[in-house]
Amino acid sequence: MTVEVHLFAAARAAVGSSVVMAQPGSLARILDGLETDHPAFAAVRPRCSYLVDEVSVHAEGIDVPAGSRVDVLPPFAGG
Amino acid sequence: MTVEVHLFAAARAAVGSSVVMAQPGSLARILDGLETDHPAFAAVRPRCSYLVDEVSVHAEGIDVPAGSRVDVLPPFAGG
Amino acid sequence: MGEIRLVEVVEHVLDAAAIEHIVADARAGAVVSFSGNVRDHDHGRSVASLAYEGHPSAEAVLMEVAKEIDARYDLVALAVAHRVGPIAIGEAALVAAVATAHRGEAFAACRDLVDLTKERLPVWKHQVFADGTDEWVNCA
Amino acid sequence: MGEIRLVEVVEHVLDAAAIEHIVADARAGAVVSFSGNVRDHDHGRSVASLAYEGHPSAEAVLMEVAKEIDARYDLVALAVAHRVGPIAIGEAALVAAVATAHRGEAFAACRDLVDLTKERLPVWKHQVFADGTDEWVNCA
């Protein structure tokens, strides 16, 4: 089982797709992998927040187990 | 020539008419006359402001010459 | 200077939606509108009917208020209208709308427009209560 | 507790007038409404087209925002809607309206509702400028 990483807005534009698969591990490692495969993601990453299985995550050190879903959320701009 | 005194809202209700004629003189004397003729006006008078020929007047001592128009304005309540 | 697009004191029904459309503008990112409506209660008493009386100068005073708000804020457009005569419960007595580039200014300007109108406009409110008594508001 | 009468994230045209009617109430003396509209300029650049993207949780988040505003203020009714997808210049992206007994509370609550929505709602704005460049707002 892998991790589903869902990308939105500027993060999706940087990565070039809405969903990518990743190996379970720390959130930091998953994001590092994204950045390696899609260098444009480096510019967006510092401004993103994350959901792991719909729960807000505030530290990249958190463990993301197999079967989880990660949402990568750039800064909101509503209104 | 006399002075036309126009009454609005609570002042009109107290006096019982929209316009009364008065003799020229100080605004205080004109208002005293109104109060004598219409005792209910005494309750409204302390809260009123006045226009003499469309100009706001802040002291009852002002002279109101013959041919003038006085507007008696209770406190506004708009909105 | 913003555009003062509507200033009126009228006897007909006010339409808050119409006044909002009047200020709409492609340059404006924010429109804030206010509708002051006749309530069925006032200070805990049931209101049966209500009417506003206006001084002949009311519309001219409202224009001065509009100009003062326009001078205080960076507006795209402004509109304000007050109704006089009898008004049914739930209907609007005062409607105001402002359009600005950014929302902070729109909220502040609309609020100030309503406050200044209520302070300066020479109009009076007469309420008849369900128990048959009546009052001129602010004159009790 | 006020009535939360409408909370939605939708792809169709928003109608500020309709949302005002939704909160109308005989108990309410004041209705304040906000319409956040797409401007033809942003930071001095001419905007050619614009679209919002929403996260699947957006409507649930908007409901949490509405409940928080309802808890902070003494409201009669509240309604708020955000549009996603492409939006034409001049059309509304966010509309909100609150009805309260008195006007001070209506202005404060509507402003707070709009601010909190902009802070918390997981939506993103993509602008294409007249010169062909584009940006995701807040990500530059």
Image (cartoon, coloured by chain):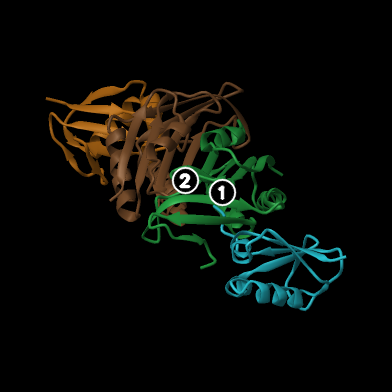
Chain colours: A orange, B cyan, C green, D brown
Q: In terms of depth relative to the viewer, which is nearer, C84 or D21? A: C84
Q: Using the numbered discs, state the Cα–Cα distance from disc 1 to disc 2 in whole angstroms.
A: 9 Å
Name which residue type carries label 1. Cys
Tell me which residue sits at (24%, 43%) in the image. Answer: A57
User: Residue A49, how many percent across, how many down?
Assistant: 32, 40
User: Residue D130, how many percent across, how many down?
Assistant: 61, 23
Tell me which residue sits at (61%, 36%) in the image. Answer: C23
Residue position marked by numbered label 2 in the rendering: D32
Check contact, mark 1 vs mark 2: CB within 8 A: yes
User: Residue A27, how many percent across, how many down?
Assistant: 23, 38
Work out whether D54 lies above or below D108: above
Label 1's element? Answer: helix
Residue position marked by numbered label 1 in the rendering: C110
Name which residue type carries label 2. Val
Chain ID at mark 2: D
User: Residue D98, how many percent across, how many down?
Assistant: 40, 45
Q: Is residue C120 left or right of residue B61?
A: left
Tell me which residue sits at (15%, 26%) in the image. Answer: A2
Work out whether C127 lies above or below A65: below
Chain ID at mark 1: C
Q: Is residue B59 left or right of residue A66?
A: right
Work out whether C100 lies above or below C112: above
Label 2's element? Answer: strand
